[in-house]
Amino acid sequence: MKNIVFLHGFGENASVWTDFIKLLNPENQYFTPDFSPKKDCFSIPEYADWLKNYFDKEKIKKAVIIGHSMGGYISVEFCNRYPEMTLGLGLFHSSVAADSEEKKENRDKTIQFLIKHDTNLFIKHFYPNMFTEEFKSKNGEFVQNNIEKFSKIPNEALLAATLAMKSRVSYIGELGKFEFPIFQILGKQDTFVNYKDALEQTILMKSQNVLLLDHICHAGMLESPEICAQFIDNFIASI
């Protein structure tokens, strides 16, 4: 039995993993910590500290850590600090690069929007961008239900998370030093993480495990859960 920790991304909570985990090998133990309510973390290292406390509380000695989007940023920081607690790392629509100047400008726009408006209006505009138009047309009720669910995330928590993402450092130079195996799941339609840029990071890794999905945007665990689950199961089994 292996410990598997799934970390959700920005603008969502741990519930994104509920149905997905049911598709995975039941012999492993799964954990889904939730940082969405946190208002007191203003940097990725602070989120990594929070994750370390979670590991200690749950008595997790070693785990495969899989992070979606912002969850990937936190996971990389944690794995760099605590390689002895890392069995493997999964970057689920994520990256080890820092924000570009353009991205930082977009973060500033997000901050200004969140200062002026409530969470509900932000999530209403932000969340649908995680999916392809085809997925949204076929799953409109599902997307709307999640918008309502994630609109309960505190506005201050979204502000703190945005500041943390904007200030994060690059770990591209560390990729080749990591001894634990790493995988990437990428969507060709992703508007948040450019898959071509992410693939360039792959060649720096000692182990190259990549799932590139043609018709997926930024939420493979919801858009293509069976394929992603099989890929992750195979990765975990190989460790």
Image: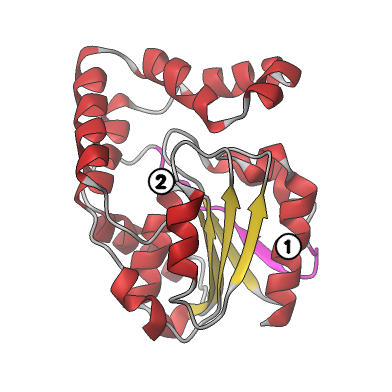
Quote the CA–CA distance across marks 2 and 1.
Answer: 26 Å
Per the image, the residue denoted by label 2 is 35
Q: Residue at x 25, y 18 (%)?
A: 113
Q: Is residue 30 above or below residue 203?
A: above
Per the image, the residue denoted by label 1 is 231
Camera-near label (2 vs 1) is 1
> Left or right: 178 with respect to 139?
left
Q: Amino acid at mark 2?
A: Phe
Q: Is residue 204 above or below residue 108?
A: below
Residue 129 is inside the magenta segment: no
Q: Quadrant of residue 218?
A: top right
Q: Residue 183 placed where, x, y %?
A: 57, 67
The local secondary structure at tag 2 comes to loop
Q: Is residue 170 above or below residue 168?
A: below
Question: What secondary structure do most residues of the magenta stretch adopt?
Answer: loop
- Circle 1 Cα neighbour tier, 10 Å, few/some/many (<14 / 14–19 / ≥20): some
Instruction: Count every numbered label the image shows and give the total.
Output: 2
- Circle 2 Cα neighbour tier, 10 Å, few/some/many (<14 / 14–19 / ≥20): many
Q: Residue 120 placed where, x, y %?
A: 41, 15
> Left or right: 196 with respect to 119?
right
> Left or right: 215 with respect to 5?
right
Q: Amino acid at mark 1?
A: Phe
Which quadrant does the N terminus fall into? Answer: bottom right
